[in-house]
Structures are given as structure tokens and as C-alpha cells.
Image (tube, rainbow, N blue to C red):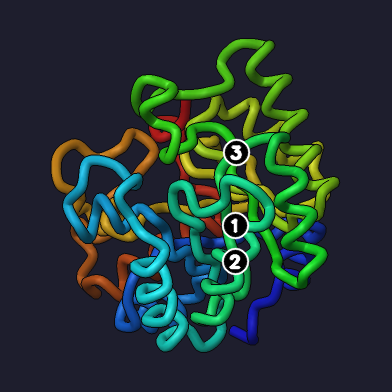
Amino acid sequence: MSKITLKTLQDKKQAGEKIAVLTAYDASFAVAADSAGVEVLLVGDSLGMVMQGRDSTLPVTLEEMIYHTRCVRAGAKEALVVADLPFMTYPDPAHALESAAALMRAGAHAVKLEGGAWLADTVRRLAHNGIPVCGHVGLLPQSVNLVGGYRVQGRSAEQAHEMLNSAFALQQAGALMLVVECVPATLGEELSRALDIPVIGIGAGPDTDGQVLVLQDMLGITPGRAPKFSRNFLAGNPEGVQGAISAYVGAVKDGSFPAPEHCF
């Protein structure tokens, strides 16, 4: 696999080639995912739950994200590294710029933030300063207290319309990629068809431009009940963790994951 850039991902979208994305939080798993052909490594604030044992992503600090981004970048030779801006580190464009710059200095190739059209000015400011941005719509884990839990979003026509408008606003402001989480499969497909930038789904059906899973979910070691949209690729795999990651990449590429049972 040659060095992955944002242009690489754009070209893959245009060619109809699926993009495999996986979270990573340290150098060892970054090496494993990179060598298996994962094109994007997301240093997710999900580390608050899967690494720290918290009940949400909210307690994760910028300093912790900087540390894990540095670790992942050390192991990523070819994959693109995207780092989450954690809760309340981007309340306005000025704070967002300072936080994003810190993650870029730690080795991120792009930053991800959660929210809709209200973030357009922030995205524009970051892009103007040379910081690539990945948006995130649908279920927003940083807003879990506001929406009353981890619920599927965009079921109504009104919600779907608002999400499409938000996605367009983020793209127009300069976002170069979009994650869409926990929405009906039909909406995931509509977003992918409507936008020019790559749309990466998690619980958004099989017709997005790519898929992302939390590493621990994909390995079947999530504490408690696994999300509906995840699949255990380690179970029964004779090649262990490395084989599981390779199987995940293959399933994303050939379209067999997600299957109907993983969709809303």
C-alpha cells in the first residue's frame, strides 16, 4: 500500500472503491492495521470508553488525544491518521484552531469534529490555516447527554433533511471527509451520493464510501453488549488479531460488511 493522502481517498470515492477505516490508540495496533491495508487510522476519543473504562467520551482531554495521536503516528507508515478533537476543545473557531494545531503537531494528518452546520465557520477557519477537517454527523457521542443516549438519528424526514443540509454546509466550508454514525442505511446512501467528499459510515449501511469500526468492537473485546453495527472478525480466525484486521479490510472492500443485520 502506498502512502494514503486525502486525494487518495477522493480518488477511491470517484472510482467506487470502498475505504477501510479503523480506530487505533497505540503504535502496535497502528502497525498491525497499517500492514493489513487499513487506509485511515482514526485516533478516536472513543479511547475514553475502550481504553479508560469511562461511560462516555466526554472526559477525554486534549492532552490525552495528543499522546495517543503521537503513539499512532509512530506506527502508521502508510495510513492517513485522523485525530478527534475532544469535547469542548472547539467551542469557537479560535479555540478550535489552537486545539487542532496541537493535534497536527502530534502527527495527525487531519482532525475530526462533531456537529452540523453551526461548525461551518470553524471548518472554514481550520481549512484556511492548512488543517484538513473531517466532519461527523448523525449520532454525536459528545452530545449523548443532549439527545438522551446512543440512539439512531435521522429516522424522520425532517431529521434526514437537516442532516443533509449540515453535511452540505460542512463540505462547502472545506471539510474533506465526513463520518456518519447510526443512521438508516437509506440515509447513509443518500449522503454518500449527494456529497463530493468521501463519506465513511459506522452503523450507516453498506452504501457509504467506506466503513469505520472501533478496534475493540471489531475484535469482539468490547465490555458489555457489542453495538448492533459491529462484527467480531477475530472469532474463529486462525490468524489471530492480524488476520482479523485483514478480514475486516477484505469485508469492507468486497461489500460483505456491513450485512443487513448490522444496519438500521
Real-space Cα separation, disc 2 to disc 3, in angstroms? 18 Å
Give the labeled residue for mark 1.
95
Alpha-carbon neighbours of circle 2 within 10 Å: few (<14), some, or many (≥20)?
A: few
At numbered mark 2, what does the secondary structure look like: helix, strand or loop?
A: helix
At numbered mark 3, what does the secondary structure look like: helix, strand or loop?
A: loop
Residue drawn 79% across the image and 47% down it: 171
Estimate the x, y position of residue 99 in percent, counting from the top left: 55, 64
In this picture, residue 165 sits left or right of residue 21: right
Real-space Cα separation, disc 3 to disc 1, in angstroms? 16 Å
Give the labeled residue for mark 3.
115
Q: Which mark is residue 98?
A: 2
In this picture, residue 15 sits left or right of residue 186: right
Real-space Cα separation, disc 2 to disc 1, in angstroms? 5 Å
Q: Which mark is residue 125?
A: none
Q: Are marks 2 and 3 in contact (CB under 8 Å)?
A: no
Q: Quadrant of residue 128?
A: bottom right
Estimate the x, y position of residue 183 in percent, counting from the top left: 53, 28
Residue drawn 49% across the image and 43% down it: 202
Q: Which of the image's four quarters has the N terminus? A: bottom right
In this picture, residue 183 sits left or right of residue 228: right
Residue drawn 28% across the image and 54% down it: 48
Q: Are marks 2 and 1 in contact (CB under 8 Å)?
A: yes
Which of these two is toward me, 91 or 229? 91
- Disc 3 residue type (three-letter): Gly
Estimate the x, y position of residue 185 in percent, counting from the top left: 57, 29
Q: Are marks 3 and 1 in contact (CB under 8 Å)?
A: no
- Disc 1 residue type (three-letter): His
Estimate the x, y position of residue 69 in percent, counting from the top left: 43, 74
Query: Would you say residue 156 is visible in this rendering?
Result: yes
